[in-house]
Image (cartoon, rainbow, N blue to C red):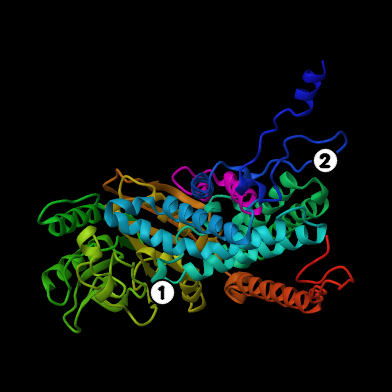
């Protein structure tokens, strides 16, 4: 009996790995009655490698909110697993690593369609851009780690969306790939979100989506912080309701009839010639349709019209036959300056009108190679540009010269320039009544890219209060009204056809056009206040007391202490 009792008293207790013991969020092997133990957190993952993989997967989840899946509702909870993982990190360094790996996963997921073109370089770019989320991961742990007070939870609802906006702002620079995949763009078909975009652009929508995710994460992780979390979610709902109720709406100002010509995929040695012939045939079929403007896609003409007057005469004849100006896009070496340009050119019944817009923001690696002397090797592992395109130096607002839309002022953009909120905003301030985006995504025809690209036009239309036409060579071509709502049916990637749209015009100025990127400026102020508060707290914190030397006694000394 005594031996059995001794075995029970010395029963073996499993020991947690050393890395788990170092974290405050490990669960204890046993607890005494009435003792509250910390719930299991992500720090209990079996190894740092597994945690890294899970961080990348968590970061990739928000991509499902974008086209083609278009699970827009998922955006409001997609960040929650990532937030919970980062807040459970045992150290700030590990939280920053979780932020970086999550950012890498997000960038790969949103840009996965680049893999066939850039191959391994896609992963290199994603890893570099993912570093932007490392400070954000550290902030998550700083504000939500452990058992945060109500004040810290409330601060997180402001600071974490602000930190996310800083990431989106930095990566929106053209040289880093541009603003493709901004979180707010996932809400392109949600009417309340588009109303928010008219107030603060896509930035405001991104901030509120992150705020909702933060509130949900606080509710899941900390029951004691329910009050600020619920208050934050109510505030988001109130802001959306206020924007819906009081933000100015576009004022109707008539209609114009616009036709989009989409020739479809053309392959082979003479693909440029085949494409032009198909565009010519499709445009000729539009005769007698009472059109105001016909729009061709990006790179729809493969030769400079000055060097090929025969092509200019053929387009001019089409304009006379259709009774409308034709906006083409020339991708060729110019005769009047060195280099290759992508240019929107307006052609009327008397030939090119002289209105020409040269693309200003080029696609990294697709149209130029940044630091080609260092990164030129990318051309050998993928489909990077063999020769850099040249940039235009100014935006251009063109004026339609014939038809019912005579005098209509249009603002052209080329390809991924439609992803930049500031460009469409500038054109609107310059007097553009209709925004036009000429695009070509045939390289990524069977991916999510065509639908993602077309959806951006809805956000730009809502931001500016101006309708936008997105015309492509191979789909998806689509038109959106001044509020961001879709006009007519889009042309999908399998179509080789034309589509006519009765496009509603509008007047008035949206708050975003008037005040610009104020959510980004507000985010900068919030982060500056956080830094000031943390600095003041560190300054007020008393210095640690220096340990006093051991006392000397009659029976010992520091060197030979008494026993």
Label 2: element kind? loop
- Along the viewing direction, whichever of 252 and 99 lies nearer the viewer: 99
The residue carrying mark 1 is: 407
**2 or 1: tag closer to the N-terminus:** 2
| 190 versus 369 height, above or below | above
Q: Residue at x 70, y 30 (%)?
A: 12
**Foreground pick, 205 / 387:** 387
Q: CA distance from mark 2 to mark 1?
A: 74 Å
* Residue 173 visible in the current orientation: yes
Q: Secondary structure at mark 1?
A: loop
Name the mark on residue 69: none
**Is 55 left, or right, of 379 in this rendering?**
right
Where is residue 300? Give x, y as percent: 23, 62
Where does residue 325 sit, x and y in percent of width and height?
A: 30, 67
Q: Nearer the viewer, mark 2 or mark 1?
A: 2
Q: Residue at x 75, y 29 (%)?
A: 10
Question: Is any atom of residue 257 visible in this view?
Answer: no
As drawn, the label of residue 36 is 2
104 part of magenta stretch: no
Q: Is residue 437 left or right of residue 273?
A: right
Query: Magenta: predominant secondary structure element?
Result: helix
Q: Which residues are magenta?
A: 59-87
The outermost residue toward the front is 555
Q: Residues within 10 Å of mark 1 (few under 14, many from 20)?
A: few
> Compared to 382, does 3 lie above or below?
above
Quarter-wise, where is residue 119 in the image? bottom left
């Amino acid at each position: 009996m005594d031996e059995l009792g001794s075995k029970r008293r010395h029963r073996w207790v499993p020991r947690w790995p050393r890395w788990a013991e170092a974290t405050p969020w490990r669960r204890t092997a046993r607890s005494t009655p009435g003792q509250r133990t910390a719930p299991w957190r992500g720090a209990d993952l079996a190894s740092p490698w597994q945690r890294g993989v899970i961080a990348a997967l968590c970061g990739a989840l928000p991509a499902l909110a974008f086209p083609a899946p278009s699970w827009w509702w998922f955006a409001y909870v997609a960040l929650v697993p990532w937030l919970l993982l980062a807040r459970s990190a045992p150290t700030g360094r590990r939280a920053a690593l979780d932020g970086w790996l999550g950012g890498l996963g997000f960038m790969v997921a949103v840009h996965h369609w680049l893999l066939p073109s850039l191959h391994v370089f896609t992963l290199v770019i994603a890893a570099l851009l993912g570093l932007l989320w490392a400070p954000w991961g550290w902030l998550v742990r700083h504000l939500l780690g452990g058992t945060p007070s109500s004040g810290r939870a409330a601060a997180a609802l402001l600071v974490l969306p602000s930190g996310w906006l800083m990431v989106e702002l930095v990566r929106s620079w053209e040289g880093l790939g541009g603003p493709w995949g901004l979180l707010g763009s996932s809400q392109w078909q949600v009417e309340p979100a588009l109303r928010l975009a008219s107030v603060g652009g896509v930035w405001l929508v991104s901030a509120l989506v992150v705020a909702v995710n933060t509130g949900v994460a606080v509710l899941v992780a900390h029951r004691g912080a329910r009050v600020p979390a619920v208050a934050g979610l109510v505030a988001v709902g109130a802001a959306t309701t206020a924007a819906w109720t009081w933000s100015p709406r576009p004022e109707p100002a008539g209609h114009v009839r616009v036709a989009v010509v989409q020739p479809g995929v053309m392959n082979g040695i003479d693909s440029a010639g085949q494409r032009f012939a198909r565009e010519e045939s499709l445009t000729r079929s539009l005769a007698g349709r009472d059109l105001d403007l016909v729009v061709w896609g990006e790179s729809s003409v493969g030769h400079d019209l000055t060097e090929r007057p025969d092509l200019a005469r053929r387009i001019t004849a089409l304009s006379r036959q259709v009774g409308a100006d034709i906006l083409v896009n020339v991708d060729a070496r110019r005769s009047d300056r060195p280099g290759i340009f992508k240019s929107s050119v307006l052609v009327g019944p008397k030939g090119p009108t002289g209105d020409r817009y040269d693309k200003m923001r080029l696609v990294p690696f697709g149209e130029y190679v940044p630091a080609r002397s260092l990164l030129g090797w990318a051309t050998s592992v993928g489909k990077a540009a063999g020769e850099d395109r040249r940039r235009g130096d100014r935006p251009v607002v063109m004026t339609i010269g014939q038809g019912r839309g005579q005098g209509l002022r249009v603002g052209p953009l080329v390809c991924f320039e439609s992803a930049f909120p500031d460009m469409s905003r500038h054109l609107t301030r310059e007097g553009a009544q209709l925004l036009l985006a000429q695009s070509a995504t045939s390289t990524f025809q069977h991916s999510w890219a065509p639908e993602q690209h077309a959806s951006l036009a809805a956000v730009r239309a809502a931001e500016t209060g101006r309708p936008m036409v997105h015309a492509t060579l191979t789909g998806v071509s689509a038109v959106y009204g001044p509020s961001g709502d879709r006009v007519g049916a889009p042309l999908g990637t399998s179509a080789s056809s034309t589509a006519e749209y009765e496009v509603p015009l509008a007047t008035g100025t949206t708050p975003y056009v008037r005040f610009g990127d104020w959510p980004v400026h507000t985010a900068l102020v919030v982060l500056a206040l956080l830094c000031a508060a943390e600095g003041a707290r560190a300054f007020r914190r008393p210095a640690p007391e220096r340990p006093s030397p051991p006392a000397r006694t009659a029976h010992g000394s520091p060197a030979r202490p008494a026993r």
